Amino acid sequence: MSNPIFSEKTIREGVANYGTPFWIYDRATIEKRIQELKCFDTVRFAQKACPNLSILSIVRNAGAVVDAVSAGEIIRALRAGYKACENDKQVPQIVYSADIFDHDAIELVKKHNIHVNVGSADMIQQLADAGVRSNLTLRVNPGFGHGHSKKTNTGGPLSKHGVWHSQLKDCVKLAQANGMWITGLHMHIGSGTDFEHLATVCDAMRDASRRLGSHIRMISAGGGLPIPYKEEEKGNRIDIQAYYDLWDKTRKDIAQSVGHDVALEVEPGRYIVAESAVLVAEIRAVKKQEDKLFYLVDAGFNDLVRPSFYGSYHGISIVSKDGRELGPEQDVIVAGPLCESGDVFTQEEGGYVVTRKLPTAQVGDFLVLHDAGAYGSAMSSNYNSRRFAPEILQNNGKLEVIRERQTFEQLMENEKIVSL
Ligand SMILES: Cc1ncc(COP(=O)(O)O)c(C=O)c1O
């Protein structure tokens, strides 16, 4: 399996210039995905998927706005050039969308007049207490959820997200009592949409809109658009037009019942960036445990956590260090350098380690983990005191650093040794 976006020459050039491991993104892929979504009135990038400032500015330049789920994400969005809200008539460039405010977040929301998509009644009260008087949207928990993993299911009684559907009216009253209007509804019920389920979500949106009354001006379909991670899924991409049509019909039904236009937003993270990037590592050991063959690489779950956390599948290819032809395929387990038995890239949900057919490779060859642009670098950690890997951008045929490798000094810069 080869990677279609980055040539072997580019991977070798990246290794020679930046060392391993490193992330490499392709600007054109991000722009193409945003273009595909332009049938929606507003494309809002869920920046949690990949918040690098250069990626945000590419997204902005391509005409998409952003959400923010923390104070840090508000600051990133502003730094990437997104503007605060000037009035309630404009589509807000930044929407704070969460179930709570921490103290930093509410201060920034007030200071920059950031639009809020509230996920709890307490948020409305806290805005009122802070003296904010602006239009709001409500994230609805419709009473059910859906997702590619239990950890990405974001609706139903066991989910912390959104306002429970039967409490919408109470939120509307609370907002109005404090001089604020709920002008939109948002539903993100999980990552990994399928069409059968989507019809139920659209019905739930119609139902929720009835509780809101005629103030509704916008609905958001949330994110959750899947991408084909497995080779056999590659020919079967989500049909964006069919996805749009279902939501468009929903918005038109709502518009008809309230007697004015209702705008339609979509809020994907994964769809926009997942396929734009790979993680490149070096094979540092090839060893056998009884009859099982392992390739041990210099990237771990501190870099890409999705296989360990969700049992997610990422395509893998190998690039020889010297341009030689690789040997025949064999069954391999790919694992990282961490002092953790779960540090395995070839595993399924529940932590079951599996093998992958990969070419015979040697120490020093490069292993490429595909479709790593969403929730890849964004979920990295410093576990085992490993440094954040650099992020590189393939931009009009050239490679540019968009985040340097963290230094050992930076790794410890906020720590102090107590005097003993
Ligand atoms: C509120 C909200 N919107 C959008 C997204 C983006 O989801 P995805 O990356 O699957 O499109 C998420 C993901 O967690 C989310 O919680």
Image (tube, rainbow, N blue to C red):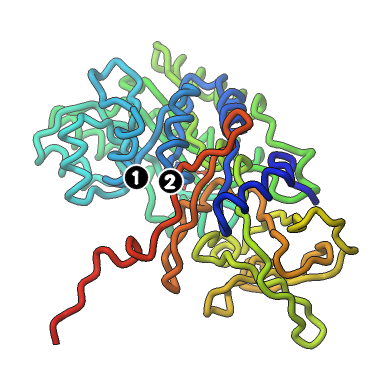
The residue located at (16%, 42%) in the rendering is 107
The crowd level at tag 1 (other Cα within 10 Å; few <14, some 14-19, many 20+) is some
Could you tell me residue 207's position as x and y percent?
Answer: 45, 33
Labels 2 and 1: the sequence-earlier one: 2
Distance CA(mark 2)–CA(mark 1): 7 Å
- Residue 200 seen from this side: no
Could you tell me residue 93's position as x and y percent?
Answer: 35, 26
The reply to whether the C-beta atoms of the residues labelled 2 and 1 are less than 8 Å apart is yes
Above or below: residue 258 compared with residue 225: above
Mark 2 and ligand 1: say if the CB distance to the nearest ligand atom is below 8 Å.
Answer: yes
Could you tell me residue 123's position as x and y percent?
Answer: 22, 44
Is 77 displayed left or right of 206 in the figure? left
Above or below: residue 80 compared with residue 72: above
**Which residue is the site of mark 2?**
48
- Residue 286 seen from this side: yes
The residue located at (39%, 16%) in the rendering is 258
The residue located at (13%, 37%) in the rendering is 128
Q: Amino acid at mark 2?
A: Lys
Could you tell me residue 262's position as x and y percent?
Answer: 42, 18
The dot on residue 322 is none
Quarter assignment of residue 284:
bottom right
The dot on residue 69 is 1
Where the C terminus falls, by quadrant? bottom left
The crowd level at tag 2 (other Cα within 10 Å; few <14, some 14-19, many 20+) is some
Quarter assignment of residue 294:
bottom right
Along the line of sight, which residue is nearer the eye, 185 or 283?
283
SS at badge 1: loop
Furthest residue to the right? 328
Mark 1 and ligand 1: say if the CB distance to the nearest ligand atom is below 8 Å.
Answer: yes
Q: Amino acid at mark 1?
A: Val
SS at badge 2: helix
